Image (spheres, rainbow, N blue to C red):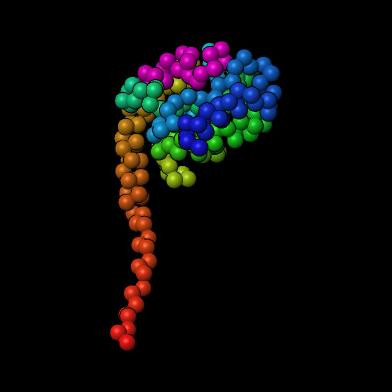
């Protein structure tokens, strides 16, 4: 099955999911969106009011700021994949609960496997916790690490700048460095691919034929 078909299948399953209580209060599921060959995947926390209405991630005020940030990084929304840890909106935009995160985790893991992105950018502490348990976003934001064979870059959620304007410049600076990080990931990936030399097929044994 192609990556595009796998992502579509996951999205269909998300829309029909009743694994946790969130589907009872949400209007629409928000599976995520983006091209199946995206090199960069952004993972936020949970859908908000506007995302719940439209069934798309990051379409509210935080989404508008995210598009500005992508522009600073020389990226377009149409070329990255955007998803959330949670696929249904929590009531009143409260934080997702551990059992809700657990119920949604299989969808996110399968999306990552289907995409196999070169770089994952986590937005906010709940997506950061998947790769950096126990860390604080204020301490490690903008510091990429190689985990499970790919570059993971923890960043503050765009909404943080809307609630606390003092974070805006900091978040913008982190996004301006994204092209540098992506280039590093591409170089390392190319080096790893070049280092894998396929085994030489065994040559058939040459037998000396007798003249008698």
- From the viewer's side, name the closer residue of 180 and 106: 106
Q: Is residue 211 magenta?
A: no
View extreme (front): residue: 212
> How far from the left and from the top, in percent, is residue 122?
47, 31
Placement of the C terminus among the 4 image quadrants = bottom left
Res 196 visible: yes
Above or below, comparing residue 39 to residue 146 in the picture: above
Residue at 36% x, 69% y: name it: 204
The magenta-colored residue range is 52-69
* Residue 45 found in image quarter: top right
Res 122 visible: no
- From the viewer's side, name the closer residue of 110 and 99: 110
Secondary structure mostly seen in magenta is helix
* Residue 140 found in image quarter: top left
Residue at 38% x, 26% y: name it: 79
Residue at 50% x, 31% y: name it: 5
> How far from the left and from the top, in percent, is residue 190?
32, 46
Above or below, comparing residue 210 to residue 157 in the picture: below
């Amino acid at each position: 099955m192609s990556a595009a078909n796998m992502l579509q299948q996951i999205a269909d399953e998300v829309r029909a999911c009743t694994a946790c209580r969130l589907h009872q209060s949400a209007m629409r599921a928000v599976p995520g969106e983006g091209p199946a060959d995206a090199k960069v995947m952004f993972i936020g926390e949970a859908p908000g009011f506007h995302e719940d209405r439209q069934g798309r991630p990051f379409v509210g005020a935080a989404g508008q700021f995210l598009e500005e940030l992508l522009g600073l990084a020389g990226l377009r929304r149409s070329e990255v994949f955007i998803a959330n840890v949670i696929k249904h909106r929590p009531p009143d935009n409260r934080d997702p609960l551990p059992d809700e995160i657990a119920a949604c985790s299989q969808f996110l893991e399968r999306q990552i496997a289907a995409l196999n992105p070169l770089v994952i950018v986590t937005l906010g502490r709940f997506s950061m916790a998947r790769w950096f348990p126990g860390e604080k976003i204020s301490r490690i934001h903008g510091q990429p690490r190689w985990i499970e064979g790919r570059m993971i870059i923890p960043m503050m959620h765009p909404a943080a700048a809307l609630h606390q304007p003092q974070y805006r410049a900091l978040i913008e600076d982190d996004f301006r460095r994204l092209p540098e990080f992506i280039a590093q990931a591409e170089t390392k990936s190319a080096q790893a691919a070049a280092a894998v030399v396929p085994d030489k097929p065994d040559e058939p044994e040459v037998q000396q034929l007798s003249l008698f």
